[in-house]
Structure formats: structure tokens, C-alpha cells
């Protein structure tokens, strides 16, 4: 009887884990205004900038990056503003097949945050390319 209970508990835990992994994957790719939107929150949850994660939304239309938006993060605002101005638009208009390999320079004074944003873009684009 004890073995049956343990097996039942393990089965419930396994199903719960499977369900949660599917739920978190559901929010990665969405559609909005005729565009595919990649949310890197769970894709790059291990990628840290200076003060934490730097999740992004990558908007794709006709296999080209339309724009990239920063999601809420804990980075120093005065430095992250520089990233928004100087880095996020570097991929605009770039074909998705080329975007993950594109070389972009980090923003001076915001190196850790820049590296994290670049890695978020790379992971988001790679996920999109595998999912198509």
C-alpha cells in the first residue's frame, strides 16, 4: 500500500511539473497586431545584467525584426535608458535568420546590461527559428 501511495504522489508531481513547463512556454510566443512576439522572460531567466534579468519582447513581422522592447527590470534606470536609445534598435529591420549572429557593440557604461540584452535577443531569435 505504501508503494502505491508513493507512486501516486510521484505521478502527480510529474504531471504538475509537465503542466507548469507547458504553461511557462505558452507565454513565450504570442501574436499581436499581425506580428509574432517573443517574450524572453522565461527563455533567458538565467541571464543577468548588472542588477538582475533584462527580459525583452521581440516583435517580428514577415521574418524581420520590427522592434524590441525592454520589459520591467531592476537595472539602473539612467544606464538602461542608454541601452533603450543606443542598443535596442540595432536589430530593427534585420532578417531573423541574420539577427542572432549580428554583431553589436555594448553601450559604454552599461556593459553588463548590454551583454544581457544581447543574449536575450540571441535566445529569443534562436527560439523563434526553432519554433517555425
Image (cartoon, rainbow, N blue to C red):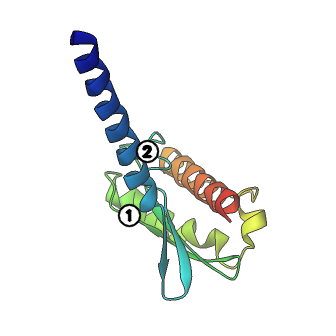
Where in the figure is residue 119, as x and y percent of width and height? Answer: 59, 49
Q: CA distance from mark 2 to mark 1?
A: 13 Å
Mark nearer the viewer, 2 or 1? 2
Dot 2 or dot 1, earlier in sequence? 2
Front residue of this view, candidates 31 and 22: 22
Residue highlighted by disc 1: 71
Q: At numbered mark 1, what does the secondary structure look like: helix, strand or loop?
A: loop
Q: Could you tell whether 105 is left or right of 73 in the image?
A: right
In the rendered image, which quarter is residue 102 located in?
bottom right
Q: Where's residue 2, x and y in %?
A: 21, 11
- Quadrant of the frame with the N terminus: top left
- 43 is higher (above) or lower (below) than 34: above
Quadrant location, the C terminus: bottom right
What residue do we see at 64% from left, 76% from top? 92
Q: Which residue is mark 2?
A: 45
At 55% across and 82% down in the image, what residue appears?
35
- The answer to which of 121 and 22 lies nearer the viewer is 22
Amino acid at each position: 500500500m505504501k508503494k502505491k501511495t508513493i507512486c501516486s504522489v510521484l505521478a502527480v508531481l510529474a504531471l504538475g511539473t509537465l503542466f507548469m513547463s507547458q504553461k511557462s512556454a505558452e507565454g513565450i510566443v504570442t501574436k499581436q497586431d499581425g506580428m509574432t512576439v517573443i517574450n524572453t522572460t522565461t527563455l533567458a531567466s538565467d541571464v543577468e545584467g548588472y542588477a538582475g534579468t533584462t527580459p525583452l519582447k521581440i516583435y517580428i513581422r514577415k521574418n524581420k525584426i520590427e522592434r524590441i522592447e525592454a520589459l520591467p527590470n531592476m537595472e539602473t534606470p539612467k544606464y538602461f535608458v542608454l541601452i533603450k536609445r543606443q542598443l535596442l534598435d540595432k536589430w530593427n529591420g534585420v532578417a531573423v535568420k541574420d539577427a542572432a549572429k549580428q554583431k553589436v557593440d555594448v553601450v559604454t557604461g552599461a556593459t553588463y546590461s548590454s551583454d544581457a540584452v544581447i543574449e536575450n535577443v540571441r535566445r529569443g531569435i534562436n527560439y523563434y527559428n526553432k519554433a517555425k
